[in-house]
Image: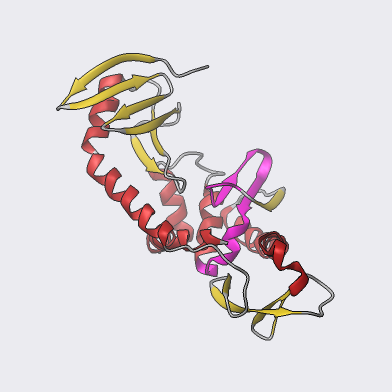
Amino acid sequence: MPNLPLSPIRTGGRSVRFFDQHLDVDGLSFNIRRSDRRKTLQITVERSGELVILAPPEATESELVEFVQEKLLWVHTKLEEKARLQRRAPVKEFVDGEGFLYLGKSYRLRLVDRQLVDLTLKNGRFCLRTASVHRGREVFISWYIRKAQAWFEKQTLQHSNRMDVNINEVKVQDLGFRWGSFGSEGRVSFHWKAALLPPRIAQYIIIHELAHAHHPDHSAKFWIKVEQHLPDWRARKEWLAENGMQVEGL
């Protein structure tokens, strides 16, 4: 169903349009996600750059507009930061000496003519078969998924026991612009790119997702649960926000 404007309005000299699905303010488009669990308004800037308003069902048009206008400076600042960080992530060329991350460390690439498998990590270097360079990205992603699957299964089990969370499945895959996801029936997923992050940051993602087993939203109770198991979560969250984009260039 297309988004149909309910009522165009002007306030504070800015053009504002309210839609049943999203809100346009000052040239920015905000998707609206309402939840019975929410009691307050919140704006998030997703890794994709998507702007989202998290709102309780009863939030009115005027309340949403006023809240967005109060946060416009913060939103523009966050968008500029993300654009700057994205420019720092060059696309890989899969040439000798190029650096590739794994668990926070950078390993130089060596192209080899004779190797039984497409890619290995040995003696502090990634070794990529020359004949596989043309599909280097596919080869690296496959390698990361295999390695990350075992790592995240082990880490998730350890943390889930401490956090009293029953886990039935751990899956590593491409989650688009999300680092992780906690689903129904104890299913937790992680983006394969999380395997490129330092372990302490990947652990923050694990605890973040496991905390959603107790609190589905990002309420105060949710962050209290995170802090119970990771007292320095703020520093790790900030590091991820500032540096996470660097792994986008593969």
Find the residue positioned furthest to the top.
6
Across and down, in percent, residue 128 comes to: 72, 74
Residue 147 location in percent, x, y?
70, 66
Whole-percent x and y of residue 139?
Answer: 72, 63
Q: Is residue 213 left or right of residue 28?
A: right
Give whichever of 226, 25 is nearer the camera: 25
Q: Residue at x 34, y 48 (%)?
A: 79
Q: Is residue 169 visible?
A: yes
Residue pictured at 42% horizontal, 49% vertical: 223
Q: Nearer the viewer, residue 104 or 16?
A: 16
Residue 198 belongs to the span the image colors magenta: yes
1 to the left or right of 32 = right
Q: In the picture, which quadrant includes the C terminus?
A: bottom right
Range drawn in magenta: 175-200
Q: Is residue 43 magenta?
A: no
The correct choice, above or below, for 22 with respect to 136 in the image is above
Q: Is residue 231 visible?
A: no
